[in-house]
Image (spheres, rainbow, N blue to C red):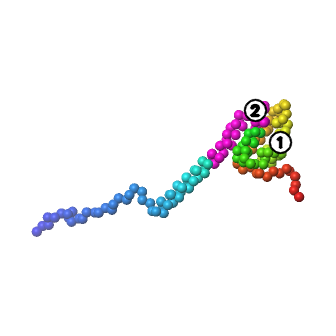
Amino acid sequence: MANTHSPLDQLADISEPALVNAFALPPLAWFAVAVLGAGLLYVAWRLYRRWRFFAAKRQALALLATLAGKADSASQINQLLKRVLLHYQHAHPALTLPVAQWQRWLAAGHSATVPDLTNLLYSASADPLANEQFYQFARGWLQSYNGKAPTEYTSGGQHA
């Protein structure tokens, strides 16, 4: 007798595995993703806090830019420097120094030269060259100021 069955009938169906869920990672990889995400959030938060901390410095630099080239801006620049120092370090001893010692303290913290503030602030006629020099000094001092000026005052003398 002839075999009437087809060989295809003898084949069994292939069972396919179930589909893998959308994004399956091992638990350690999920932990690494969580730690990395928390680290990025922490860095972003610190950068935001730093940006907010230096808002007064940015505002002082913008105000200083408006004072550029004005003949009588020396006293305003001096007040601006003291206001920035007062904002960041409200109990700083340099805030109560007389003009000559304030000038020496400013000069000790920055490489640029400071013009004679006594003549610049209290003279009847404004010296445009000294005024511009003080403006340049103030801009450099503000740009390099990091919110923590040294509190010790050195008068320039030697200690025994």
User: Farthest residue toward the left?
Assistant: 1
Q: Is residue 144 left or right of residue 125?
A: left
What residue does disc 1 label?
A: 99
Q: Amino acid at mark 2?
A: Gly
Q: Is residue 54 left or right of residue 7?
A: right
Which class describes the residues within 10 Å of circle 1: few (<14), some (14-19), or many (20+)? some
Q: Residue 131 at x, y = what percent?
A: 80, 35
Image disc number at residue 69:
2
Q: Quadrant of residue 143?
A: top right
Residue at 24%, 65% in the rendered image: 12
**Please, what secondary structure does the residue beneath circle 2 have?**
loop
Based on the picture, tell me whether residue 127 belongs to the magenta stretch: no
Q: Main secondary structure of the magenta part?
A: helix
User: What range is drawn magenta here?
Assistant: 50-77
Q: Residue 67 at x, y = what percent?
A: 73, 34
Residue at 83%, 42% in the rendered image: 99
Q: Residue 123 at x, y = what percent?
A: 85, 33
**Please, what secondary structure does the residue beneath circle 1 have?**
helix
Q: Amino acid at mark 1?
A: Val
Q: Is residue 36 visible?
A: yes
